[in-house]
Image (cartoon, helix red, strand yellow):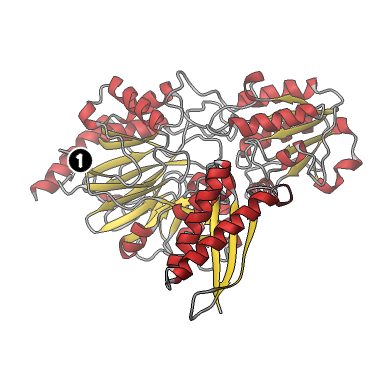
Amino acid sequence: MAKKNNENNNNKKQNAQQPNNRSQSKDKSKSKGFQYNKKGGKQGFRSRNGSAKKYRKSVDETPVKIAFLGGLNEVGKNMTLYEYKDEMFLVDCGLAFPDPEMLGVDLVIPDFSYVEKNADKIKGIIITHGHEDHIGGLAYLLKTVNIPVYGTKLTIGLIQGKLKEHGLLSSAKLNEVAPGDVVEFDEFSVEMIHVNHSIPDAIALAIKCGAGTVIQTGDFKVDSTPIDGGMIDLSRFAQLGNEGVLALLSDSTNAERPGYTESERKVGESFDVLFRKAGKSRIIVATFASNIHRVQQIINVAASLGRKVAIMGRSLENVVDISSRLGYLSIPDNVLINADLINKYPADSLVIITTGSQGEPMSALSRMAFSDHRKVEICPNDYVIISATPIPGNEKTVGKVVNELLKLGAQVIYEKMYDVHVSGHACQEELKLIMGLVKPKYFIPVHGEQKHLRKHAMLAEGMGIPVDNIFIADNGYVAELTNSSLKSGAPVPAGKVFVDGYGVGDVGSVVLRDRKHLGQDGIIVVTASIDYETGQLIAGPEVVSRGFVYVKEAEELIEKARKVAEKSLENSYYSNISDINAIKGKLRDAVSHFVYEQTKRSPMVLPIIMEV
């Protein structure tokens, strides 16, 4: 009873200080804004003006545990697991694109083993926005754990497209929410807060449980003049800060950059100048497929100058189709044309929007640059704008594409030449603004490489958060938070799972090591037939090389390698070695040693011995 009275007194003080406080008392529990999730079982979601569980002031010492399953010390693969008492839920499930040394790998997704182990405790997954590094792994997760999914309108639309490709749409439990809605689980209450980002419908999360309130910003920036007209809900962050916030998990991508991130409208102004400057040239703009605001501005400027617009790239076509159907893109009549018709229009009346701003080898822009595109042939009359900054690690691939475009005579506008790109992530002053509004007791930087996390932690320290209250995590770490402590819990599995074609997880470190070995030094295959009973050589050995030397120019070397192999097999016979694996091992060692002595190279030697 004392606990309840204390809660009521606190609420009265709070309401007296903040007449417009959005927390509601019990007498408003029948608000029409409350809706139960039809597919999600007992849990539901409601408007922020609906009934609310009374977590706010009744704080206990049971820790809320936050397990980081991806997104730390890397760019991409974002996934976080929250646990309180005997209940869990997830935030985001993204993918990462492979590093150059991950030969043959298509995608990298989080390790779901810990999620699968606790599937009966997980009530759902909430997606902060529709970028690949936050939704790209969801289809693979839902194949193993079919849990309810919550996201805003555009996010759900993009997810539906992905699930359809994987044949999962009919079985998925998709739930659309909006900023201000609250998803109610048994132990958790999760409120959606509108934020600005480079894609519409991005949200931050206010996560409430008995341990207190945790805010996870998702990807965000503070844009006072956003394209969609909805500025980040700073007042709600401030209100939550006044109510008391246990911890803040904040986007660290631009933590090294001082000042503020420019408004997306700045890019639209640059497009207007550049499009006019292009004169009679054909304009080609490369951008991120998911940057709907950027696509909208390109279309607006093109339409104002009487140019038609064609879309190139499968991912971009999908996003434009979904966004226009859901009302997030406004395309004037007769502006958009089919890509097959571009050669029927004069160059000065055409704008092509394409993928490939990161120099991806199979993207539309890369194929144009290397004269491998079926519909677009780059010529000196082309004016190419790369409307993106290279993601760390992509600088060389982008530079290669730029060089090839220049060789073909095109004029190329890229990186910092003009204001053709602004980030979707907050810079230092915006990060500090959120910290100042939220006033968290504990701070955990997320979403970034180690240098970003460290710099963000330094900003937090400068804002007055004690060093002992700052937690720099890594994938697999677990933060355990109570009102009186922040500590590291037992680690959980959180590795990388490689997707190669239809295979998920069947390519591991051993396979990648072999691929790297093959790629660097090639392979020598030695085949022979031996008698099953005696072990005597019957046929061969034959030596075949691929990726090591050109056989016709190295016949002498190959013949010597064949004789070394023959001698090794004869020695095994005369030594009465009957174990086929032992014979193979001696053969491999003999040929490898000989080849290295002759060439100082170490190709993979693969012995194939048939017993007849």
Toward the viewer: 380 or 299?
A: 380
From this view, report whether residue 379 is shown above or below residue 118. above
Q: In what element is the residue under mark 1? A: strand
- Quadrant of the image containing the C terminus: bottom right
Q: Position of residue 388 (x, y in %)?
A: 62, 31
From this view, report whether residue 179 is shown above or below residue 383. below
Looking at the picture, which amino acid does disc 1 mark? Answer: Lys
Residue 111 visible, this orientation: yes
Residue found 72% across the figure and 33% down from its top: 285
Q: Position of residue 63 (x, y in %)?
A: 20, 47
- Where residue 457 sits, quadrant-wise, is top left
> Residue at the front extreme?
574
Please indicate whether residue 458 sits to the left or right of residue 70 in the image. Answer: left
From this view, report whether residue 246 is shown above or below residue 577. above
Please indicate whether residue 241 sits to the left or right of residue 142 in the image. Answer: left
From this view, report whether residue 298 is shown above or below residue 507. above
Mark 1 burial class by Cα count in 10 Å: few <14, some 14-19, many 20+: some
Please indicate whether residue 303 sits to the left or right of residue 330 in the image. Answer: right
Q: How many numbered discs sit on the rendered protein? A: 1
Disc 1 designates what residue? Answer: 487
Toward the viewer: 511 or 384?
A: 511
Q: Position of residue 19 (x, y in %)?
A: 31, 33
- Where residue 447 sits, quadrant-wise, is top left
Toward the viewer: 273 or 112?
A: 112
Toward the viewer: 490 or 425?
A: 490
Residue found 23% across the figure and 49% down from its top: 490
Residue 97 visible, this orientation: no
Residue found 33% across the figure and 33% down from its top: 239
Please indicate whether residue 578 sits to the left or right of residue 454 in the image. Answer: right
Q: Position of residue 271 (x, y in %)?
A: 71, 25
